[in-house]
Image: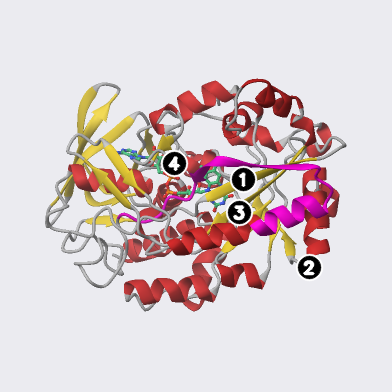
Amino acid sequence: MVYDFIVVGSGSGGGSLAYYLNKSGAKVLLLEAGKFYRKNTFPRTEAETSADLYWGGGIEFAKDGKMGFLRTKMVGGSSIVYQCLMDRFDDNAFDAWKDESGVDWFSNATMNEHYNQVESDMALHTFTEKEWNRNAKLFIDGCDKNGYKWANLRRGQSDCALENGNDCIGCLGGCIRDSKQSSLVAFIQKAEKEGLEIQADTEIHKVEPGNETCKIHGMQNGNKVSYEAKKVILSGGAFGTTRMMYMSGFKKKLPALGKKFSSHPQFMWIGFQNEPVDAHKLAFQTVASKDPEFRKKGFKLENVFAPPISLAMLINITGSKHQDYMKKYRYMQCIEVAVRDENVGEIISDKNGKLTISKPLTDQDKERKTNGLQAIKNILLSSGANEVFESNFYFGLHLMGGCVMGTDPSKSVVNPEFNVHGEKTLYITDSSIYPNAPGINPGLTIKALSHKLSTQLIKG
Ligand SMILES: Cc1cc2nc3c(=O)[nH]c(=O)nc-3n(C[C@H](O)[C@H](O)[C@H](O)COP(=O)(O)OP(=O)(O)OC[C@H]3O[C@@H](n4cnc5c(N)ncnc54)[C@H](O)[C@@H]3O)c2cc1C
């Protein structure tokens, strides 16, 4: 059969797109390489979460072994594990995209209606003082003492029932209450009730766009499968979509494939307090820096934490000192700096889909990191930490670029209509089309862009 639309990948971009296309009455198929977990079937231990929910069974590293990347593989994609902090871009972010890409509709004026629609389809909540845990209170105290501006975060959640003893840190392995507004909760499960066809455990390896239809080929539970649609939209995320495009032989035709990869590198510092902080309790992340000077300098600070096994991995010392640190888990206060990095990274795939990621830090990235870490140190020490510790590891959770949007086919992969250059039946919407790093959480804008594409596709 020939579908109207096939969406490949069910994360922030694909899940929301499939929902909007399905709502229009079109015949839509949503394909996903990973498994279909629900609130009552998510793995619960840290080890199982890592092994079952992530591509590569956990952290994947850049080729220099320094930077780790997290990307998930399941229905809902990375939105299952994300913190669901939902931020709109500012004009600075869209202007930087316009300059890089030549795409003139990148603006809040154009995106406003799409943000509005996506926001109205999600339950959103802005945190208040009564939800701050002690980690947040210490962050605020340190910011105030140093004159840094901060703000409560806005999160996609319906009812986390923290008063019943729920701790949101468990949400990192999937929300067991369907409170967190992942693509699964906000879009896919709703569309499923309205007849959306979803096939999990289906990994696409090759796309063959033609003039009238697009064929795709892959494996489902060990068996070869092929599908056909009038239009195919790739939403496999920065690594996944770039990989599919490489495996389909697009690199020769589109030399920009794999280029302009950025990832908001995150560096964590831990402070040790004399009294328990219990940063793992209650709402996990409620406040962040909102300082115009930090924005100008290209970084932001977030008030995060990690479960014990992940945190133990971050402490890059061994033996009794490591043991001493871990015994003080309840006394740890944690802040990270996320750098608005330059898009000089590259995603490369061989014909079998083996990825090699290059992500050097530029001098500008390093300067931004140093400025951010100095601000963190100031906050930690002025809020009473008796010792501070910096992890050697750093991470990219916001994987962006590889199939960037632009007007020039020699410098981009998709055109301003989300169409792969020169291919009428093949489209891309996900974080791979981001021209450069916005320095702002990417998830809401990925969904808003998918909504924009859906209106265009539905019009025909
Ligand atoms: C721990 C963590 C916390 C985060 N917190 C936030 C936050 O608070 N706010 C925010 O805005 N962002 C956050 N992010 C980032 C955000 O989750 C991602 O930027 C966003 O989900 C990316 O959306 P996407 O559609 O590009 O890709 P994904 O959501 O990763 O979805 C891609 C999907 O495609 C599937 N796929 C890939 N290849 C194939 C193939 N060949 N065949 C079939 N399926 C395929 C994958 O399995 C995956 O399910 C966080 C990320 C992480 C890891």
| Separation of marks 4 and 1 at Cα, in angstroms | 14 Å
Q: Is residue 411 above or below residue 360?
A: below
Judged left or right of residue 310, residue 334 is right
Q: How many marks?
A: 4
Label located before the other in sequence (2 or 4): 4
* Residue bearing mark 4: 66
Q: What residue is drawn where x is 42% and y is 34%?
A: 73
| Separation of marks 2 and 4 at Cα, in angstroms | 33 Å
* Residue bearing mark 2: 147
Quadrant of the image containing the C terminus: bottom left
Label located before the other in sequence (3 or 4): 4
Q: Nearer the viewer, residue 413 or 37?
A: 413
* Residue bearing mark 1: 268
Which amino acid type corresponds to the residue marked 4 in the rendered image? Lys
Q: Is residue 283 above or below residue 287?
A: above
Q: What residue is drawn where x is 12% and y is 54%?
A: 252
Which amino acid type corresponds to the residue marked 2 in the rendered image? Gly
The span shown in magenta is 374-402
Residue 268: x and y in percent read 61, 45
Q: Which mark is residue 337?
A: 3
Q: Is mark 1 within 8 Å of ligand 1?
A: no
Tag 3 secondary structure: strand
Judged left or right of residue 301, residue 338 is left
- Is disc 3 surrounded by few (<14), some (14 to 19) or many (20+) residues within 10 Å? many
